Image (cartoon, grey):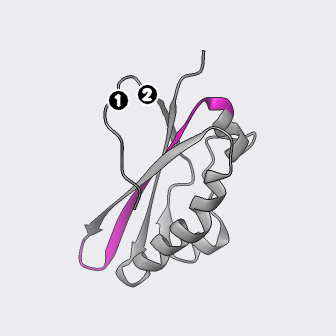
C-alpha cells in the first residue's frame, strides 16, 4: 500500500531576488514536476526574514516514496536545486525532509 509523502525543503533569497525565484519555480520547476508520475501537488510558502531577505519553504506531495525516487534519484534526501534556482538563492538546505501524511483535509488552490 502506498503512503502519500511530503518532501520539505527551504531556502533564502535577497528581497530583490524573491520574485525571480518564484518565476523560476512557476515557469521551470512546476512544468517538470507535473510531468512526473506520482507528483500530486505542491505549495510554496514565504515570509520576510529581517529587512533584506525572504525565506521560502517548498513542500511537494508525492503518491509514494517510489515517486519521490523518480524525481530525486538514488539519494532522495539530497536537495534537487538546479543552477537557475541557485542563482536566486543566498542559501538553502542541502538536504530535504520527507514526511508521510498521517491526516489531511482540504485542497490547496493553484496559483
Q: Check whether the beta carbons of the residues at disc 1 and disc 2 lie within 8 A of each other.
A: yes
Which residue does the image show at 63% across and 37% down from the upper left? 38
Residue 73 seen in the figure? yes
Q: x%, y% of residue 36?
A: 68, 47
Foreground: 67 or 86? 67
Q: In terms of image quadrants, where is residue 101?
A: top left
In the displayed structure, 101 sits above or below 20; it is above
Q: Secondary structure at mark 2?
A: loop
Residue wearing tag 2: 101
Q: Is residue 59 something that shows in the picture?
A: no
Q: Nearer the viewer, residue 24 or 36?
A: 36
Residue at 66%, 36% (x, y): give it.
67
Q: Residue furthest right?
A: 74
Q: Residues within 10 Å of mark 2 (few under 14, many from 20)?
A: few
Front: mark 1 or 2:
1
Asked whether residue 62 is drawn in magenta, I would say yes
Label 1 crowd bin: few (<14), some (14–19), many (20+), radius 10 Å: few
Image location of residue 10, percent across then percent down: 44, 56
| Residue 11 inside the magenta-drawn segment | no
Q: CA distance from mark 1 to mark 2?
A: 7 Å
Quadrant (top left/top right/bottom left/bottom right) for the C terminus: bottom left
Residue range highlighted in magenta:
50-66
Q: Residue furthest top?
A: 1
**Location of mark 1 (residue):** 104
Work out which quarter of the rendered image holds the N terminus and state it: top right
Q: Is residue 14 above or below residue 25?
A: below
Amino acid at each position: 500500500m502506498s503512503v502519500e509523502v511530503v518532501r520539505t525543503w527551504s531556502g533564502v533569497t535577497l528581497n530583490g531576488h524573491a520574485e525571480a525565484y518564484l518565476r523560476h519555480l512557476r515557469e521551470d520547476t512546476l512544468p517538470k514536476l507535473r510531468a512526473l508520475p506520482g507528483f500530486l501537488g505542491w505549495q510554496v510558502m514565504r515570509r520576510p526574514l529581517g529587512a533584506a531577505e525572504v525565506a521560502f519553504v517548498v513542500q511537494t506531495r508525492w503518491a509514494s516514496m517510489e515517486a519521490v525516487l523518480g524525481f530525486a534519484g538514488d539519494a532522495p534526501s539530497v536537495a534537487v536545486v538546479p543552477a537557475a534556482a541557485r542563482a536566486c538563492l543566498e542559501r538553502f538546505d542541502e538536504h530535504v525532509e520527507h514526511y508521510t501524511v498521517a491526516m489531511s483535509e482540504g485542497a490547496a488552490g493553484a496559483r
